[in-house]
Amino acid sequence: MQVIRIEKLNLDFHNAPLFKNSSIIINKGERICLVGRNGTGKSTFLKILNNEISPDSVDRFNEDSIIISKLNQELPVIKNETAYNFVARGLKKSGSVLVEYHDHLNVDPSGHNDTWMNKLDWLQKEIDTNNAWDLETRIQTILTTLKIDQDVIVKDLSGGWRRRLELAQALVTNPDVLLLDEPTNHLDLDAISDLEKLILDFNGTIICVSHDRALVNNIATRIVELDRGGFYSYPGNFSAYLELKEKRLSDEAKTNSEFDKKLAREEIWIRQGIKARRTRNEGRVRDLVKLRDERSVRRDQISKPSFDIAKSELSGKLVAKAKNVSFQYPNSEREIIKDLSLTIMRGDRIGILGPNGCGKSTLLQLILGKLLPSSGTLKVGTNLQVAYFDQLRDQIDPNLTVADNVAGGRTQIVVNGKAKHIISYLSDFLFTPERTRSSVTKLSGGECNRLLLAKLFSLESNILVLDEPTNDLDIESLELLEDILQNYQGTVILVSHDRFFMDNVVTQLLAYEGHGVITEYVGSYTDWVNFKDKEALQIKSSVKQNKPKQKLERTQKKSSKNQKQAEHLLKNIDIAEKEITALNKMMATDDFHNKPKDETKKVYDKAREVELDLESLYSEWENLDN
C-alpha cells in the first residue's frame, strides 16, 4: 500500500538542478535508507516530505491525515526545561496542557491551597477534553525506553543524550512516517544499538538518511540512492545495494559509450564534403539534433574523491608503553583510567571503544604524552610525528577561505616532496575551484570534515590520531579513507562509533569496561561483539546449570500425581542444557570466528532461543515445586 507518491519532482539549487523530473513511491511499513554523495539532496528531500521547503514543481499524492515526524540532523536548541516538557511539546496543544499539568504537580506542597486545587481540576478536565491521558502514558513509555530521566534539565545533557531526547519527541506523535536525518550523529555505540531496536520495532514507515553503513545494513528493507537528480531503488540492505549499484553503473557506462560512438559517427557524416551534403537525409539530420540535445542534458558520473597522505620518517619501533597506569584529574574522585598496561608498536591500528564521556580523549592525550599519569609508568617512543585530527578543528579559521586554511595563503602545497597547486590538491577532496575560494562558514558538515582531512593529509606524520573522523562524510569518502588508513605505513589510533569503519581499519581494540577499567582485545569491532556475546551467554549458562541440581534433590518429594510431569520437565531441561553446552563449545573455537557473519549469527540466535526455552522450563519447574 502506497503511503506517499512523488512524481515529476523538480528543484534547482544555486542554479544547478538538484532534482529533475524525479519520481519515487514510498510504501507502508518500508524502511528506506537514502544514500548518496554529500550535496545530492538527501536532507533536502526529507525537508520536502516534511513540508519545510517547497520544490519548484511536484505532483504529490498522500492522505491528508498522514502524520509525518522528523528527527533533524542538527541538535535541539539547549533549553532550561525538563526532558518531559521537551518531549511533550512535540504533541502541540495536547502537549502544552500536559506540560502545564506536569509543572503544576511539581509545585512545592506548601503551595497546595484552594487555588492550586482549582487549577488542578481545570487541567484534568482539559486533559479529558483533549483525550490526552494516553499521551501522558506514551511520553512516559518512550522516555523509559530511551533511558531518559523525565526530570533531567535539557541544557545539562550531552550531545548524545540530547539526540535521544529529540528522537523521543519525534516518536511521541506516533507518526505514520518517521524521517531520520543522520540519526547516529553524537550517539555512542550503546545508544546506536538502542536506536536500531527502536527502528526495527517501529510499526510505521521509515525514511532514513545515514552514512552509518552498519545501521543501514541492519535496518533497511530498501536502499534508494540519490544520484544526479534521480532516485535509484535497490531492494534489500546495504550489502545487496553495493552489488546492484556496481552493475547499474557498468550498464550505464556501456550504454553511454555506445551512444557517444553513434553521436561521433553522425557528427562525422554531417561534416562530410559537398558530395555527402547533396544526399543528406533530412530525417537523419533531425535525429542528429535530438542526439545532441540528449547529450547536452546528460549528467555523467561524478569523479570520485582521491586523497593522498604526506609521508614522514618512520617512528621508533616502540610508540608507547604503559605499566599499571592510572589517571584522575586533580580534585576529582573519579578514576578515568585504572591500572592500564599496554604496549603500542609502530604500525599498530588501534580502535578505542567506550560510551560518551568515559574518557576516550583523555586516554589519547595520555598515550601521546600530553598528560602525565597519576600513578604507574608511561614511556613514549622516539621520533613521533603526530597528526591529530580532532585538534585541527581548533586550527580552522572560519573567516578564511578553504584554500587559505590549508595552504596558509600560498598558491602551492608540497606533499611527499611534490609541489601541487592548492586548487588541484583540494579538487582531490571534491572541492570545486569556486568552493576553494569560499569561507569556511559556508561549508556543510561533510565539506568541513573533508577540509580537515585535506589539512591533516598535508602534514607529515608517522602517527595518525583520529577522533570521530567519519562524521558527515559520504560513503565514497569513507571507503577511500579506509583504503588510505589500511595502507598507511605509520601507526593509527582511532576513536569512532562507526562500526563498519572500525571493522575495516583496526586490528586491536581498547574497550572501556566501566570504572576506569580498559581491556585490550585483538581483532575488529565485530570480533569484540562476538566475544562479549559469547562471554555473556556462558555466564548465564553457568548460573542456570546450578539450578537443576537443586531441583533434583527435591524430585523424590513430589507427589505421584506430579511425578510424571516432573520427570518430563527434567528430561527437557537436561536436553536444553546439553544443547547450550554444545553451542558454547562451538563458539569457543577459533574456526567459529573465521566463519561468515551470517553463519555465526545463526548460532548466536539459536543459543539465545535455547536460553529462552530453558528459562521457560525452569519457570514450569518452580510452579510445579510450589
Image (cartoon, rainbow, N blue to C red):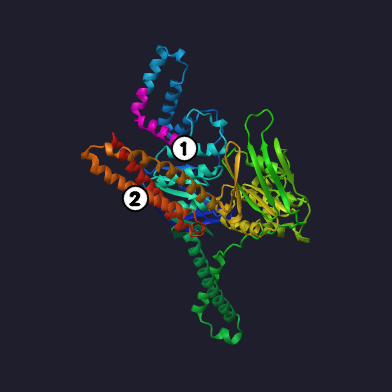
In the structure shown, which secondary structural element does the residue marked by tag 2 occupy?
helix
Dividing the picture into quadrants, the one containing residue 155 is top right
Question: Residue 420's spot in the image, x, y percent?
Answer: 75, 60
Which of the two discs, 1 and 2, sits closer to the camera? 2
Q: Residues within 10 Å of mark 2 (few under 14, many from 20)?
A: few
Q: Which residues are magenta?
A: 124-146
Residue type marked 1:
Leu
For marks 1 and 2, the one nearer the N-term is: 1
Residue 250 shows up from this direction: yes
Question: Residue 262's spot in the image, x, y percent?
Answer: 54, 77
Please name the residue shown 56% across and 49% down the image: 498
From the image, tell me which residue sits under label 1: 146
Magenta portion: prevailing SS class: helix
From the image, tell me which residue sits under label 2: 575
Question: Residue 364's spot in the image, x, y percent?
Answer: 67, 43
Q: Indicate left or right for 316 with 341 as reference.
A: right
| Above or below: residue 479 compared with residue 132 | below
Q: CA distance from mark 1 to mark 2?
A: 37 Å
Dividing the picture into quadrants, the one containing residue 419 is bottom right
Q: Residues within 10 Å of mark 1 (few under 14, many from 20)?
A: some
